[in-house]
Amino acid sequence: MDPRTMPMWQELAQRDDLPMAALPTLIQALSRPVPARKDVAGRGERQRLAAFAESLPYLMPCTTASPGLRARLIHASSPDQIVAMAAVGTVTINDLAAITARRRIWPELITALAGHPHQMDHTIELLDHLGAEDLENVLARWSDVHHNVQPTPVVPGPLVEAVCYRLTAPLAADLAAPQTALDGIRRIANGNGDHPSDCEDILWRTLDAHPDHWPTLVADPCFGHVVGHMLLEHAPTQQLDDALLNVCLPAATCRELTNASQRTPAARERLRRIAHRARQHPRLLTLIPDELHTAANDSVARGRPLHYNQDTDYAPGILRIVEDLATVSANPQQLALATQLVTQLPWPLIVVGLPRLTPTAWHSPHDDEPHQLLERHYQHCRAQALVRLASNPATPSAAVTAALTTLHPAELTWIRLYPDTPLWCVRAAAAMPAMPDQGVIHILTDTELDNHPDPASTLQSWLDARLWADTWLSDDICSAVLRSRHRTTAILRQLSARHVLTQGPPSIAAQLMLSACGDEPSRWSALLDALDAPLEEKTTFGQLTDQIAHSDSKRQMNRDTPGLADNSSSRT
């Protein structure tokens, strides 16, 4: 077919007096691709495609009584053309056999077909052919698919419900089985996370995009409880009116976890989830206080979270449990034990005098007050947990007062200045004896250390303080020690080798390597071998120099005893 004849075929397709006898030839001429050997740079095929696109709206209505010709037109059409015709009703559900003969079901096709209520039931059945991401696109692409339809139809409720039903089915199956209930609750809790392709993330995005359908979805007997979990976990409380929140109440206490096979982890996760939901929606504490308190008691009985082992337990995790109990528990004994648990956690380390890497004009000397540094370095968590316990009316005030006597002075100051601290707790913290320098490490300059009788012991006290410092502060202390001219060999050997060689000044690292390796080529070679593998954080500079010396002595011994070296190589 000569592509230069395409305008003629297009003109014929648009004529009202076109005889039906010419229709098969016309469709064949417009739908048959131009052979590549006759096409220069694809220009002829582009002309054919343009003529076919202009002729398609005129040809499709003429093929209603001829399924074979209609199928040929559909096979020659692109997916976008099929979707556009389905949106305006030219292509219907009756053409599905011709569509699926060459293509699989795709989201935009279902979106277009669903715009016509009379074929909604058959369209919903097509959702079973789609995965989770494609199900989301059925609703997400609604306005794009129907942009040429005036007025733009509203997303039908049955379609939203059908999509949500299929998205909630895996989560509902997990919650129904004791072996997978814990995983199901965790997946729901992570439904607004960093995994956009996960079913739970897709479900929340779908729900978030259609808040008008929440009352209908949460009341559904099949998957309404999953929607209730999702709304309580992620929906802003202002979007849940009292009526809707009341419908979500059966899901508030995560009863699915009571029979979970993983007894202890499930109980702790249940406490965490109900506390999060109570903080997210404070009205739950007035609507179902007894249910929340009972769930908290059951979680403590099953999960036994009120203990702390410094060697095995993660302190931030213990603090989270304490704050959860402070939110939902009404048991004075549990709250008193939680208060004691806070006092067993490590003391904060307050380091004053660290040099600022980027001084700012707005910096005030008051910003380096111990209680300010406490919060800046995120070490105020113990004090914050005690404040939340004190805010619970069921917490014995005597237990909180006793805990205050064990706090760091900076923590007491933070409690007094924190705006949410109850008044009686503020007064109790103010009544504690003042010990301003206790538990505070002062980083001194070399000039200040010059006036100290034993600068090395001061540097050693800074290093000893790292035992209860976090990584960030520990690195800053190591930097201060490394830069001091009062450092000794014994002190340098305690520093992290990685910090000395990679984070300290290069001049200091170079001088230390010169002292360690000297003019011995074997030691320099041993240094290179030691640095070929990444240095572990726990490897000290002393261990690195000992390793270099050991490698050097081993090579020297092999050179002095060639027979031993030959035997070793032969065995190898």
Image (spheres, helix red, strand yellow):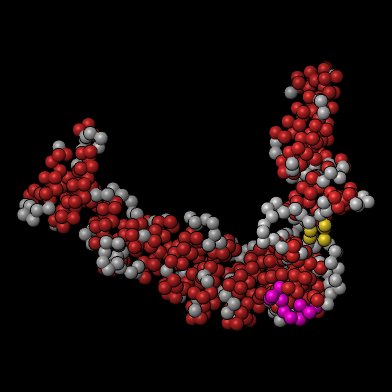
Q: Is residue 423 magenta?
A: yes
Farthest residue, direction right: 453
Where residue 22 appears, as percent x and y from the top left, is: 8, 48
Where residue 513 appears, as percent x and y from the top left, is: 79, 34
Query: In the picture, residue 194 is in which quadrant?
Result: bottom right
Residue found at x 82% / y 61%? 440
Name the one closer to the observer, 302 or 77.
77
Look at the picture and state if 416 lies above or below 13. below
Quarter of the picture containing the N terminus is top left
Farthest residue, direction front: 361
Relative horizontal placement of residue 126, taking residue 570 as reference (left or right): left
Q: How many marks?
A: 0
In this view of the protein, can residue 263 be seen by the observer? no
Q: Is residue 191 magenta?
A: no
Name the one closer to the observer, 348 or 170.
348
Query: In the picture, residue 498 is in which quadrant?
Result: top right
Quarter of the picture containing the C terminus is top right
Where residue 43 appears, as percent x and y from the top left, is: 23, 38
Question: Which region of the structure is painted magenta?
Answer: 418-428
Residue found at x 80% / y 40%? 541
In this view of the protein, can residue 371 be seen by the observer? yes
Relative horizontal placement of residue 421, taking residue 176 as reference (left or right): right
Relative horizontal placement of residue 485, taking residue 191 as reference (left or right): right
Residue found at x 76% / y 31%? 527
Name the one closer to the observer, 270 or 390.
390
Residue found at x 56% / y 61%? 190
Name the one closer to the observer, 147 or 215.
147
